Image (cartoon, rainbow, N blue to C red):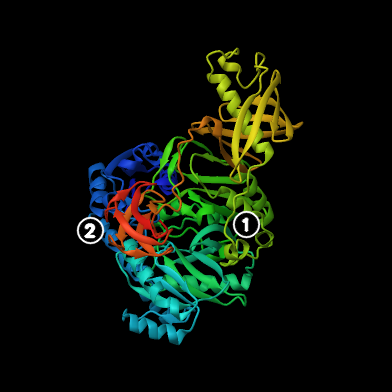
Amino acid sequence: MSRQFDSVLVANRGEIAVRVIRSAQAAGYRTIAVYSEADVDAPHVALADEAVLIGPAPVKESYLDPARILDAAARTGAQAIHPGYGFLSENAEFAAACVAAGLVFIGPSAEAIELMGNKAAAKRRMLDAGVPCIPGYQSEDQSDAALLAAADEIGMPIMVKAAAGGGGRGMRLVSHMDEFLPALEAARSEAENAFGSGELILEKAVLQPRHVEIQVFGDSRGNVIHLGERDCSVQRRHQKVVEESPCPVMTSDLRAAMGEAAVAAARNIAYVGAGTVEFLLDRDQRFYFLEMNTRLQVEHPVTELVTGVDLVDLQLRVAQGAALPCTQDEVSLRGHAIEVRLYAEDTVNNFLPASGLALAWEPPQGEGIRVDHGLFPGQMVSPFYDPMVAKIIAYGEDRDTARRRLLRALRQTVLFGIATNREFLIDVLERESFARGEATTAFIEEEFPDGVRQSPPLAQDLGIAALLQYLEAEENSLDARVSDDAVLSGMSGARSIASNFAYSVDDELQAVSVLAQGSDCYTVTVGEEQLELELIDSAGEGSLRLAVDGVQQDIAYGFVGYATVALQRRGRTVVLSNALGLSATDRDAEGSGAVLAPMHGNLLTIKVALGTVVSRGDELAIMEAMKMEHRLLAQVDGVISAIHGVEGEQIAAGALVLEIESASQ
């Protein structure tokens, strides 16, 4: 529906809500935000001209409830709705409901969303349109027998995919037939919980391809163009981690061919607005249709940087009936842009989503750097929503300049209080295969075959942590002989007695002592190693300039818990707790038979009963958190002796779900 409007309600949250609101306000629109009880203090709420509370934290009771969104639009007099991405952005019923309510839905028609939102129907349509597709099965018969027969005909390896939705949910790679039926069960369950549909398709797995997508744009006058490609090959759990434009192996002929196929796909369904046609590109530069996303993509900033086009502003213009401002011949790509997704997740623990307070947040700045985020210091990163907290993007005249700028930006990024993938992203960008532009969808598996490992703290880390905690104690001490404003810039009255600390390194305590040698100078002893530390300058709370054995460097730090300090230097973060300041009453529950929730989330299913005999590795329960399913496994052999969790209830991280009486007891 195209008509004039001057107000836009953004039916989303986080960084994309902030992104849309800013472009809409720059174009002169009145903006309305919606928010859940968990987001009452979120940046997108404060940024918008008006904001409406739409319900409690769970998405089904707030951001995924069309009635609440439409009610917010009616109450504020909004004339158009921008869905962002995720949530209701690809919900055909919601798009139709907006039009029925007299609102402009800033996106394609409900018919286009419905057609391309189902991978099976979309693939059938693309085959009819002559778009190259991967061999597979996309028929309506969803019986195990039919899928098993199709798998046998296609041959291994096979991708099992949810026909609805995206984001890697409901997707499994199967390499052997004996893995096929369990993969079907797991994919169906995840798809039903995520999308309300357990329909699946099968595709021949294209091994080690590139994931290359084409940004298309159509207007209501029948014009369709593409704005080049994005390479999104670096992925984990089928979710993108790094995106760039242009694709490192793209040629002008290949771009023309892929662009023509993408435009044909969009034109075939009378597409209006921003959309993305995704392809797999094999080593021989053959490409195959994967799916079409009928919305703005998370990675749209890299396209904006290399084309100079504000895609959100163009969405707003096209939604009002305007024609595209250029023809295909006038589209050009200049320079190179790379984007990384900063996730709240524990990379060492299989990228498990994390939640908690962002105790410190300092996004990077610099030449060619763009940061899209919806975060502020002290904000709770909720377990109810996607764990992506920010996107960091770098632009350069060439790919290596963009890569170096992005590396520097990541090393400057500070986020204390929650686990993140920041250091993993640095590691990815530093890998030679990535630097050479050789990354495929197998990149993480190939480069990190044993998973991500956390390096132990260095002696300098221990020494700096001890110094920071020493200074904190001096500041808080009643008998400190310095003024409050001199703590980090002149310890003239410092004590001459060494202060002692102890930190855990490889499960052993490492003794550290700090001895003040005069104003701003300290001798720190770490085991048998001695360091000379000098405070050069304090740039304010959370940052200082420190000379370590005569080498000056910048240190970011934060006191993130009792006797615990986080420090970041040279791009690396360590969190250290002074064992001498902690209670020794903590007990290690590992191997005790206690099954704990690894994070905040919803307990979907308990798969055992009292008295069930289980073996180590057996699946006991399924949780959902941050849009992903997580299976709780038995850590010991034994018998289920107690069930504390209740299906369907929200549980906190560390909550006791089940107990196993160990067979060895």
**Residue 495 visible:** yes
Marks 1 and 2 sit apart, C-alpha to C-alpha, by 42 Å
Q: Position of residue 439 (x, y in %)?
A: 62, 64
Q: Nearer the viewer, residue 591 or 404?
A: 591
**Residue 321 visible:** no
Q: Which amino acid lies under the numbered mark 1 shown in the image of this protein?
A: Arg
Helix, strand or loop at mark 2: helix
Q: Nearer the viewer, residue 301 or 485?
A: 485
In percent of the image, x 43 and y 82: which residue is there? Answer: 151
What residue is disc 1 on?
A: 334
Residue extending farthest to the front is 665
Q: Nearer the viewer, residue 167 or 589?
A: 589
Say few, some or many: other residues with alpha carbon within 10 Å of mark 2 (under 14 / 14 to 19 / 20 or more): few
What residue is disc 2 on?
A: 100
Quarter of the rendering occupied by the N terminus: bottom left
Q: Position of residue 496 (x, y in %)?
A: 68, 17
Where 382 sits versus 439, above or below?
above
- Answer left or right for 231 relative to 549: left
Quarter of the image where one finds residue 94: bottom left
Quarter of the image where one finds residue 189: bottom left
Q: Position of residue 357 (x, y in %)?
A: 44, 39
- Answer left or right for 425 relative to 1: right
Quarter of the rendering occupied by the C terminus: bottom left
Where 550 sits versus 656, above or below?
above
Where 514 sits versus 89, above or below?
above
In percent of the image, x 31 and y 56: which residue is there? Answer: 641
Where 503 sits versus 285, above or below?
above
Helix, strand or loop at mark 1: loop
Q: Position of residue 192 (x, y in %)?
A: 31, 66
